[in-house]
Image: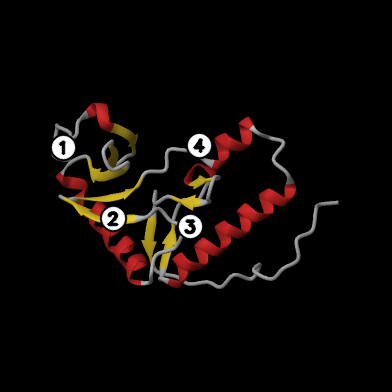
Amino acid sequence: MTDSIQYPTGFGLKDVVSWGTTGMACIDAVTQTVIKTAHDTNNQDKTAVEKSIYERFQQRGGYSGLLRYYGPYESGIRLEYAPKWNLSTFLRKYPEVGFEQRLRWAQQVIDTLCFVHAANIIHGDLTTPAVQPSSIVIGSQTWTPGWQCQSAWKDAPAQAPS
């Protein structure tokens, strides 16, 4: 591992909006997008895999439930910026969100995952922090090539718990 963090050209610590074990996301204030890149050269292969996965989604027409991919940026990728709260934070702040809305969100997550799985990709860490409640957008914390599914819930009737 190298000792210094490698920011994308034109970005620095003040632009970092997210940080993970292998990379970071820097806000591009002009375009309101983020540049997601590896911390160092030792982690660039992980960013390259994520790039290939987003390109696979793009080849299939993209999906409204995924962060929009705008293409490569140096050794990283440019993605839609999703600044709103994640689902976990949102539900803690607004616990009164009704059952019907929660069901709609669950269906949107299922539909998005079916698109992901149809592209032969697995989301390896789908938790409420990876989900944006405003439009149900799933982030890319952990993508893995492989697997498929179909939505068994698509036409299931919505029933409130008893």
Please name the amino acid that badge 2 sits on: Tyr
Badge 1 crowding class, 10 Å Cα cut-off, few under 14, some 14 to 19, many 20 or more, is some
- Marks 1 and 2: which is nearer the front? 2
Residue 94: where, in percent of width, then height?
65, 33
SS label for mark 3 = loop
Q: Which residue is mark 1?
A: 6
Please name the amino acid that badge 1 sits on: Gln
Query: How far is mark 1 from mark 2, CA to CA?
Result: 21 Å
Give the residue displayed 46% in from the left and 72% down from the top: 118
Query: How far is mark 1 from mark 3, CA to CA?
Result: 30 Å
SS label for mark 2 = strand
Q: Which residue is mark 2?
A: 70
Q: Residue furthest top?
A: 14
Label 4 or label 2, whichever comes before in sequence order: 2
Q: Which residue is mark 3?
A: 65
Query: How far is mark 4 from mark 2, CA to CA?
Result: 22 Å
SS label for mark 4 = loop
SS label for mark 1 = loop
Please name the amino acid that badge 4 sits on: Trp
Residue 13: where, in percent of width, then height?
23, 28
Label 2 or label 3, whichever comes before in sequence order: 3
